[in-house]
C-alpha cells in the first residue's frame, strides 16, 4: 500500500447484502466508514449535550462551538429565513468534516475521496434548492436566471450563461471536495513511500529519509487544515445556493 498511492482509494466488498436483477449489492468499506462517521457524530452531539452543564466541559464546548459556527454561517449567507435549513447544513458540515479527518488516520478510508459520495451530496443540495425554489416562489424562481438591469440585446446570452452556470453547480460542488481530498492523500502517500524506501537503503538512506518524513508531518498538518476548510466551503456554498432558492431575484 505504501508503494501504490491509488490503492488506498479502492472500495472492497465486505459482505453481500441483496441482489437485484442479477446485480449483487455488497456492504463495503466505504459504507462501513460512513456508518462509523454517523455513529461518532451522534455520540459527540448527544453525549456532549446530555449533561447541559452551565459550565460546559470539553465535549459540550466542541458541540456548542460547532453549532454556533454553522448557525452563524447560515445566517450570514442565507439570512434569518435560511435557518430553517440549519439542520440540513449542520449535518452536511459535520459529515464532511468527520469524513475528511477520519480519512487522515493510517489504514482508514477517506469517504470524501470518492466522487460518487461527493456527487450524491451535491445533487442532494441541488434538488433541494430547485424543489424549494419552485415551492416557495413558483415560476418567479426563474428570475434567478434573469439578472436585473441587463440590456435586452444581450439578455438571451446572459440567461443561457446563468442556466449553464446553475446546472454546473453540482459538478463544481462535488469535484472541489473530491479533488482536494484525492490530491492531498496521494501526496501524503507518495512522501510516505519515499520515507519507507529510503529508510530501507541503509544508514545513508535513513538520513535521506529525514526530509520526506518532515514533509509528511507538514503535509499532515496542512491536510488537517484542508479537511476543515473543505467542510466549511461545502457548507457555505450550500448556504449560498439555498439563498438563491429563498431570494431568487438578483
Image (cartoon, rainbow, N blue to C red):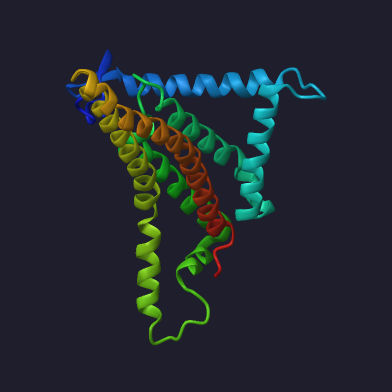
Residue drawn at (63%, 24%) of the image: 45
Image quadrant occupied by the C terminus: bottom right
> Which residue lies most toward the front here?
204
Looking at the rendering, which quadrant does residue 249 occupy? Answer: bottom right
User: In the rendered picture of this protein, how many numbered marks are placed on residues?
Assistant: 0
Instruction: Residue 88: give x, y in percent of width and height.
Output: 56, 39
> Which residue lies most toward the right here?
54
Instruction: Residue 147: give x, y in percent of width and height.
Output: 49, 74
Is 201 above or below relative to 75? above
Is 82 above or below relative to 108? below
Tell me, yes or no, if residue 20 can be seen here: no
Tell me, yes or no, if residue 236 can be seen here: yes
Instruction: Residue 132: give x, y in percent of width and height.
Output: 53, 51
Residue 208 left/right relative to 142? left
- Depth check: 35 or 131 in front? 35
Image quadrant occupied by the N terminus: top left
Looking at the rendering, which quadrant does residue 70 occupy? Answer: top right
Residue 22 left/right relative to 37? left
Residue drawn at (58%, 56%) of the image: 136
Is 97 above or below relative to 234? above
Instruction: Residue 174: give x, y in percent of width and height.
Output: 37, 45
Residue drawn at (65%, 43%) of the image: 71
Amino acid at each position: 500500500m505504501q508503494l501504490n498511492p491509488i490503492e488506498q482509494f479502492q472500495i472492497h466488498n465486505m459482505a453481500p447484502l441483496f441482489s437485484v436483477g442479477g446485480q449483487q449489492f455488497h456492504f463495503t468499506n466505504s459504507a462501513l466508514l460512513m456508518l462509523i462517521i454517523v455513529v461518532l457524530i451522534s455520540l459527540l452531539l448527544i453525549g456532549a449535550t446530555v449533561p447541559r452543564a452551565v459550565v460546559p466541559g470539553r465535549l459540550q464546548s466542541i458541540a456548542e462551538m460547532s453549532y454556533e459556527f454553522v448557525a452563524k454561517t447560515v445566517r450570514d449567507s442565507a439570512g434569518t429565513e435560511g435557518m430553517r435549513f440549519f439542520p440540513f447544513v449542520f449535518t452536511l458540515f459535520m459529515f464532511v468534516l468527520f469524513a475528511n479527518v477520519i480519512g487522515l488516520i493510517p489504514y482508514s478510508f477517506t469517504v470524501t475521496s470518492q466522487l460518487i459520495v461527493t456527487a450524491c451530496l451535491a445533487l442532494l443540495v441541488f434538488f433541494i434548492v430547485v424543489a424549494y425554489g419552485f415551492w416557495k416562489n413558483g415560476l418567479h424562481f426563474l428570475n434567478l436566471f434573469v439578472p436585473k438591469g441587463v440590456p435586452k440585446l444581450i439578455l438571451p446570452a446572459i440567461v443561457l450563461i446563468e442556466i449553464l452556470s446553475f446546472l454546473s453547480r453540482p459538478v463544481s460542488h462535488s469535484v472541489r471536495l473530491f479533488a482536494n481530498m484525492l490530491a492531498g492523500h496521494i501526496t501524503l502517500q507518495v512522501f510516505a513511500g519515499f520515507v519507507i524506501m529510503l529508510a530501507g537503503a541503509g544508514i545513508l538512506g535513513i538520513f535521506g529519509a529525514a526530509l520526506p518524513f518532515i514533509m509528511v508531518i507538514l503535509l499532515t498538518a496542512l491536510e488537517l487544515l484542508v479537511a476543515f476548510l473543505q467542510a466549511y466551503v461545502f457548507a457555505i456554498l450550500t448556504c449560498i445556493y439555498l439563498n438563491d432558492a429563498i431570494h431568487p431575484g438578483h
